[in-house]
Image (cartoon, grey):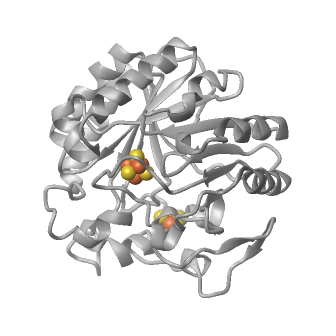
């Protein structure tokens, strides 16, 4: 088994395309913020034009189609066809598992590299209070159906104080479902959860000691079962190098209202550094997120310092650790894994 921090790849590009923000679920930690991201559904003509725009800028970008729930879009399959024809290096569909519009029968494993399912617990009793009644059964049935049709499947589990006590049960479920890759995500103080963060103490970020104790161990268990596992590094020792992905990578988070962010933590604010004007990607007026990326502070990520300082060390003059960029990942690979695929999304 190999565990490594995966450095940012300077030449790769990742296009996270929210084609709509509508969703059938109401997850307690939903990061979508319609006031900032829009509540419109992009029509297929606009989706294709915007895909063209990004592929001209980055000819072999990785594309992640997401929402809201992207399978609610009746033309998702057409968007996939178009992106494949444009030459996107990989295409991932992020889904809550409801797989609307018969999407599994409208695309093929040649067209979609990965279906990425979101599930926050190993059983309904853990998952459903977070993601909605019945969502565990629907999502796991969706995984089974996708595997049956030959798709590669990954699973994202968003970890908070509400479910970390049960995270250790996830690897056995992943193995049973034959999931190909496991992503552990840290809950962010964002979107529709932001307003009641103080009142919902059961749904908070886990403290550093708990994260460092539990998450790597669960990742190693999943890897021992043959499942490559990726999780955010979150905490850096003081001697470790801090880097801001906004400065050194090409990540684009596109929303249906035309805002384009480089940093996921900025998405709750009108801080986008780019925007779509018609079919053109243009700079957004300053001050924007790009002005923050160059600010060096002892605590690491400046946006974390601004919006979720509760995870910082008590002594901010001489901090005992730093907060890593939210895009910095640790990867635990099974020892027999003979594959160069360092996919982090
Ligand atoms: S987190 Fe995803 S699945 Fe859950 S409500 Fe938000 S968009 Fe829907
Ligand atoms: S999370 Fe922090 S370090 Fe990462 S891109 Fe955003 S501002 Fe930069």
Q: Image quadrant for the C terminus? A: top right
Residue 298 visible: yes
- For residue 137, what is the image quadrant? top left
Residue 1 visible: no
Residue found at x 29% / y 76%: 318
Q: Is residue 158 above or below residue 97?
A: below
Q: Is residue 1 above or below residue 135?
A: above
Residue found at x 52% / y 51%: 67
Residue 170: x and y in percent read 27, 28
Left or right position of 272 against 325 = right
Q: Is residue 319 above or below residue 230?
A: below
Residue found at x 27% / y 19%: 172
Residue found at x 51% / y 35%: 100
Left or right position of 138 against 154 = left
- For residue 260, what is the image quadrant? bottom right
Residue 185: x and y in percent read 38, 46
How many numbered discs sit on the rendered protein?
0
Residue 156: x and y in percent read 40, 38
Residues 53 and 49: in front is 49
Left or right position of 149 against 326 = right
Q: Image quadrant for the N terminus? A: top left
Residues 146 and 265: in front is 146
Q: Is residue 274 above or below residue 48?
A: below
Residue 319: x and y in percent read 29, 72
Residues 149 and 231: in front is 149
């Amino acid at each position: 088994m190999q565990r490594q921090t995966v450095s940012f790849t300077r030449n790769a590009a990742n296009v996270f395309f929210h084609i709509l923000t509508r969703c059938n679920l109401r997850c307690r930690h939903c990061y979508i913020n319609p006031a900032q991201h829009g509540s419109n559904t992009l029509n297929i003509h606009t989706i294709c034009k915007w895909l063209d725009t990004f592929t001209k800028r980055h000819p072999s970008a990785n594309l992640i189609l997401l929402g809201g729930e992207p399978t609610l879009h009746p033309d998702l399959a057409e968007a996939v066809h178009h992106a494949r024809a444009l030459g996107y290096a990989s295409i991932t569909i992020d889904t809550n598992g409801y797989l609307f519009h018969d999407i599994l029968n409208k695309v093929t494993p040649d067209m979609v590299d990965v279906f990425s399912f979101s599930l926050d617990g190993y059983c309904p009793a853990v998952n459903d209070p977070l993601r909605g009644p019945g969502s565990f059964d629907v999502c796991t049935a969706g995984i089974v159906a996708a595997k049956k049709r030959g798709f590669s499947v990954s699973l994202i589990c968003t970890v908070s104080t509400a479910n970390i006590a049960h995270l250790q049960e996830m690897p056995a479920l992943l193995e049973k479902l034959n999931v190909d890759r496991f992503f552990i995500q840290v809950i962010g103080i964002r979107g529709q959860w932001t307003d009641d963060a103080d009142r919902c103490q059961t749904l908070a970020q886990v403290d550093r000691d708990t994260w460092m104790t539990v998450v790597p161990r669960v990742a190693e268990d999943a890897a021992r079962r043959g499942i490559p596992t990726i999780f955010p590094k979150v905490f850096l020792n003081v001697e470790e190098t801090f880097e801001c992905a906004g400065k050194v990578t090409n990540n684009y988070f596109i929303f249906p209202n035309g805002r384009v962010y480089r940093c996921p933590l900025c998405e709750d604010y009108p801080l986008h550094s780019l925007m779509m004007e018609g079919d053109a990607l243009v700079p957004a007026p300053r001050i924007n997120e790009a002005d923050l990326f160059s600010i060096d502070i002892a605590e690491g990520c400046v946006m974390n310092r601004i919006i979720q300082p509760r995870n910082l060390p008590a002594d901010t003059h001489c901090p005992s650790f730093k907060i890593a960029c939210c895009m910095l990942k640790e990867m635990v690979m099974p020892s027999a894994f003979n594959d160069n695929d360092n996919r982090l999304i």
